[in-house]
Image (spheres, coloured by chain):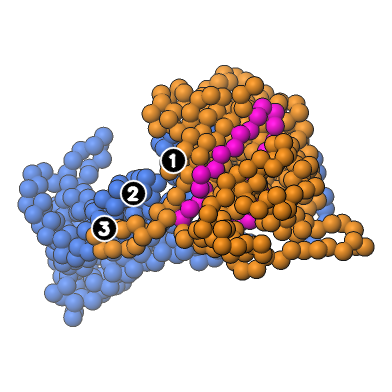
Amino acid sequence: MPPLLEVRDLVKYFPVYSRGIFRKKIIGNVHAVDHISFTVNERETVGLVGESGCGKTTTGKLILYLEKPSSGQIFFEGKEIVQTFSKGSKEEQMKLRRSMQMVFQNPYASLDPRMTVYDIISEPFKIHKHVPSSEWKERVYKLLEMVGLEPYHAERYPHEFSGGQRQRICIARALAVEPKFIIADEPVSSLDVSIRAQILNLIMELQERLGMSYLYISHDLSSVRQISQRVIVMYLGEIVEHAPTEKLFDRPVHPYTKALMSAVPIPDPKRKMNIIVLPGEVPSPINPPPGCRFHPRCQYADSKCKEEKPVLSEVDIDHFVSCHYWHKFV
Amino acid sequence: MNLRRRSDKETKERGASQWAVAWRRFKKHRSGLVGLGMIMVLLVIAAFHNVIAPYPARPHPDAFKPLYEGESAQPPSWKHPFGTTVMGTDVFSEVIHGSIYTIYVAVTVTLISMALSVAVGIVSGYFGRLVDDVLMRVTEVFLVFPSLLFILLFSRIYQLGVAEPFWDVFGIKIPVGLTIVVIIVSIFGWASYARVIRGEVLRMKECEFIQAAKSLGASSRWIMLRHIFPNILPQVIVLGTLTMASAVLVEAAVSFLGFGDPNTITWGRLMEESLQDLSTVWWAEVFPGLAVFLTVLAFNLVGDGLSDALNPRLRE
């Protein structure tokens, strides 16, 4: 079965300008996303992890064409997204918009403060006109119920809700177009720990009921482990490791993934944690290091890592690692 | 502390819109309320100026004698609260009749310059790139003009071409010359506001709810009208109130310098007419000036109160 979403060699550079009097000159590029490829299957949740600034959110925005990719291709149900949005017809674009949605990181900024919840959730109906206006009310109530809110909440404004409730409203709005694929960009990272589990459960429950696929973007490894079937680890705009969840958490191969895993807190005071502390800082994405991007912080790096770029190689079934010395770490 | 639980009925009521919240906060702003009260008084005076004023308006600006009692240069008294001019006109009546023009100038200048600045600010901020570059250069041209000089120049040029003093629009007499002044003042007044609004739009454009609307497939027009405009409206209202104050002031200055509409007797013109008699008939100068001062003050107080009430960063 072909995958629902396929990302091929996706690149996004943000140009950095010098401020001139007459003409702006490009003095460099932020390598936000650098040649990444992956797939998402139907009814699957893929986790995308990495530290701040590694290009996770940009990847999500590129898939939704909220940012224009510098190069590369994205196929959704066999249709190329970049082509469709730059050259395709309005109907095709709207069809794609209906099949993919995003839930954003900050529920305090992702709802229009001047609109009632009813207006927010019915906005997709007004844009796509896929529901006759006589049914809007009923549909909004149904969506609210689906995300665990009450019908009377429809008449309220966003500022009257808590963070968790707002995230539920965001999910309801995303569901209003009946999408097949939802990008969840750190949906729980700005919520209280006690609320996180509720929202994660809601996300998983909705997947079971409606059969959607998710790209779950997060830096919180424990939530990624809970929700996703496969995990992609990104570092400085590149994929360093890509594996089914269990394999990745049980036997991480890449030194960066190992360091990440060692930092996950274990809720057991008796167990001693061996945290691998990475030396130095994340290098600037404007001038990423040559060779393996991780080499300045990697304790195993040698001259080969400094010069030669590693490629993703399959170290186990469905387990890909981008490291020259992966056989040492398996 | 109020520990009473909200009843079910209360929770099910429609939520308080941000306008209701802003009004609740404005009601606590004392100087804002004073300003609002002063504007109300001005509106009542303007609406009933023919009833309130003890003497009728001059039928023509140069016709002094027929309707006035000829008591020239009288100091303020019960009969003439603001005194009379050398020509024998009652300053109190003239100020009251002039209020209608003040309102006209304040409202129209604000509508025109706000419409311009909102349109330019939103389009420039939202589209960015080349559109932004072009529009901002145009805006800067208007910003660096010595605007008062140009207002005086253009007022004089266009006033000469006025054939009839008033347009009759549904029975309301619209002074043509004053309208020309209004348009010129608006054209030279919108630029700085456009920059403020553009800044707001730039900030808002990155908000996730705009991104969400885009990912829903909303068009640029939809986003600008349904999301950006309602969200900058509070700032537009505050800027608009302050524009009213400056419009009154600029119009008074133009008339005072003798470049105003020769067919309407505005407060600025009243001051200009009696300037040469300042040493003896000071009241003919002070009271129209006071009217301008109080009006500008009132609009500024309301603007201040509104900006506090509408500012989301200040909590009750």
Of all chains, the one bearing label 2 is B
Residue drawn at the location 58% of the way across and 64% of the way down: A296
Residue A143: which disc? Answer: none
The crowding category of the residue bearing disc 2, from other C-alpha atoms within 10 Å (few below 14, some 14 to 19, many at least 20), is few
Q: Which chain is blue?
A: B
Of all chains, the one bearing label 1 is A
> Circle 1 is placed at which residue position?
A71
Q: Is residue B1 visible?
A: yes
> Circle 3 is placed at which residue position?
A23
- The magenta region covers A30-53
Is residue A114 or residue B59 the one in the foreground? A114
Residue drawn at the location 56% of the way across and 62% of the way down: A303
Q: Which chain is orange?
A: A
Amino acid under label 1? Ser
Q: Quadrant of the N terminus of chain B?
A: bottom right
Residue B138 versus residue A116 in the image, above or below: below
Q: CA distance from mark 3 to mark 1?
A: 25 Å
Disc 3 element: loop
Disc 1 element: strand
Magenta-drawn stretch, dominant element (helix, strand or loop): strand
Q: CA distance from mark 2 to mark 3?
A: 13 Å
